[in-house]
Image (cartoon, rainbow, N blue to C red):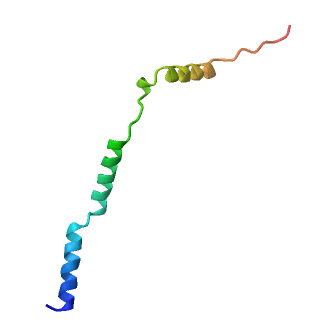
Amino acid sequence: MNLTQNKGEARKSKRKNAMKPKARFVKSVTETTRKTEIEMPWTRGARRAAMIARRNEAQAPKRVLRSA
């Protein structure tokens, strides 16, 4: 075998073992989702109740007092 044939075989073996970009992306996304733990709104308890109270307070109409 000559040198060019060896290089060609080396390239083919690298291509077989290399991940395609889409597969690599999917793999990284699935690994991240396994690691990440997100708090859902219904698990937050008192913190969520306080946030809802603040939001309702901000939406309530403000009463303006006028002097007589």
> Where does residue 57 sit, x and y in percent of width and height?
61, 19
Residue that sits furthest to the right in the current view = 68
- Quadrant of residue 23 in the image? bottom left
> Where does residue 12 sit, x and y in percent of width and height?
20, 76
Q: Is residue 67 above or below residue 37?
A: above
Give the residue displayed 33% in from the left and 56% down from the top. Answer: 25
> Where does residue 9 sit, x and y in percent of width and height?
18, 80
> Where does residue 28 sit, x and y in percent of width and height?
33, 53
Quadrant of the frame with the N terminus: bottom left
Give the residue displayed 59% in from the left and 22% down from the top. Answer: 54
Q: Is residue 40 above or below residue 8?
A: above
| Closer-to-camera residue (14/52) | 14
| Closer-to-camera residue (18/60) | 18
**Relative horizontal placement of residue 5, taking residue 32 as reference (left or right):** left
Quadrant of the frame with the C terminus: top right
Give the residue displayed 41% in from the left and 24% down from the top. Answer: 43
- Quadrant of residue 40 in the image? top left
- Quadrant of residue 53 in the image? top right
